[in-house]
Amino acid sequence: MLTFYYASGTCALAPHLALEYAGAPYQAVRIDFASKQQRSADYLRLNPKGRVPALVTEGGVLTETPALLQYIAQSFPQAGLAPLDDAFLLGRANEFNSYLCSTVHVSHAHRMRGYRWVDPEDTHAIEAMKKKVPQTVAENFQLIEDGMLQGPWVLGERFGICDMYLFTLAQWMEADSVDPARFPRVAAHRERMRADPVVIKVLAAQSAAA
Amino acid sequence: MLTFYYASGTCALAPHLALEYAGAPYQAVRIDFASKQQRSADYLRLNPKGRVPALVTEGGVLTETPALLQYIAQSFPQAGLAPLDDAFLLGRANEFNSYLCSTVHVSHAHRMRGYRWVDPEDTHAIEAMKKKVPQTVAENFQLIEDGMLQGPWVLGERFGICDMYLFTLAQWMEADSVDPARFPRVAAHRERMRADPVVIKVLAAQSAAA
């Protein structure tokens, strides 16, 4: 049995979806960001980074979304969530997931979490960061639209972990003042994901726990 | 034959080291950042992101350091550069590499590449970002020092791709005004890497090409 720690509206949605698609036995535990539970002593013992997601496995705790996605795919290979035996295709999957975590998520984080990179009291710098988010996030999605999303799924015909991660971050476009209509292929991918019973189930479970 | 595009002083050092440790047949091509060669039409055709590293394989082009590291490890399994068959240990490796790309490298980038996230003309915001880099980079290395680096190598007794990536980013500490003496385990790891003939060879090759 795996124990999965998440917060609603975060990138933890991606591995949450992967656990469901994999048919993994798991218990989901919601971390309440409003009461700063991610900084509580109990949670910091589990994950010293004070972030989500975190996955407690028999071997120990794992963190970082791309790592969790591949771990879940590899632990439940019958679900076929990643091209594990093809070094190049798995490289493509990891290239995509690395871009999301190191570039797209980081662009987005400058809207609400600018305090990570400047003095939180420096309102000018905080606002300067917020102001550029619509541009940087749009540039990132343009690259995805133009080639990284092969269609219909990220890696082509084969659905998998990259789709769950893309869907998760694409949910944030409107809040980042990016018009999804500018990226029709990404938008169509998002709609297909939203209509999927597994996605509906996981989003409902996260809402019910909130 | 693989073709590997890199620039000196960048995170491309990590996969460059991996290619050498793997004994991979490859040709290294230096991209000159001073003349903005990474934004040239020829290079953008190869890698629309306009960044390094990029690796041209028989299947196509791969980018993003964590993806390249795992691709090289998986393509040359006899070198034993990653625990490919153990989902948890590979998860640990990917957790470490994801942290480096999405957090440590990003903290560092706010010193020289703040223009990515604010208007480049906004000198106040650019300086505000630079100012916090010593603190954020030090906090990141503190987490590595306190637990992520198991010792003697990142994953314990087994040397591999995480060590090449950690060494690469740890080289930037002094430039980020972070004193390596605060992180004795990271500093000792860096010294062991620096003394390794493969590291010496790759650093010399990058210098000779510059």
Image: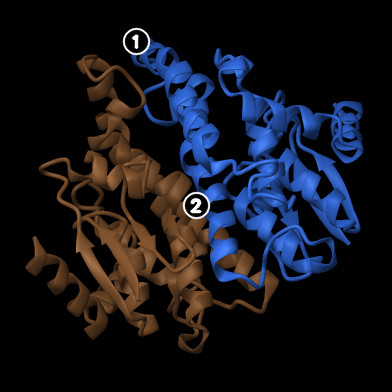
Chain colours: A brown, B blue
Residue behind mark 1: B124
Residue tagged 2:
A99
Looking at the rendered structure, the kind of residue marked 1 is His
Compared across the picture, whether A191 is left or right of B94 comes to left
Where residue A159 sits: x, y (%)?
44, 80
B110 up-or-down from A137: above or below: above
Quadrant (top left, top right, bottom left, bottom right) of the N terminus of chain A: bottom left
In the shown orientation, is residue A93 left or right of residue B82?
left
> In the picture, which quadrant includes the C terminus of chain A?
bottom left
The front one of B166 and A47 is: A47
Position of residue A113 measured from the top left corner of the image (x, y, whole percent): 27, 34
Please name whichever residue, B186 or B169, is drawn nearer the observer in this view of the structure.
B186
Three-letter amino acid code at the position of disc 2: Tyr
Q: Residue sitting at 11 percent across and 44 percent down?
A: A34
Q: Is residue B90 above or below residue A2?
A: above
User: Visible in this render: residue A186?
Assistant: no
Locate residue B24, reporting x and y percent.
88, 58
Dot 2 falls on a residue whose secondary structure is helix
CA separation in Å, label 2 and label 1: 28 Å
Q: In which quarter of the image is residue B33?
A: top right
- Answer left or right for B149 relative to A121: right
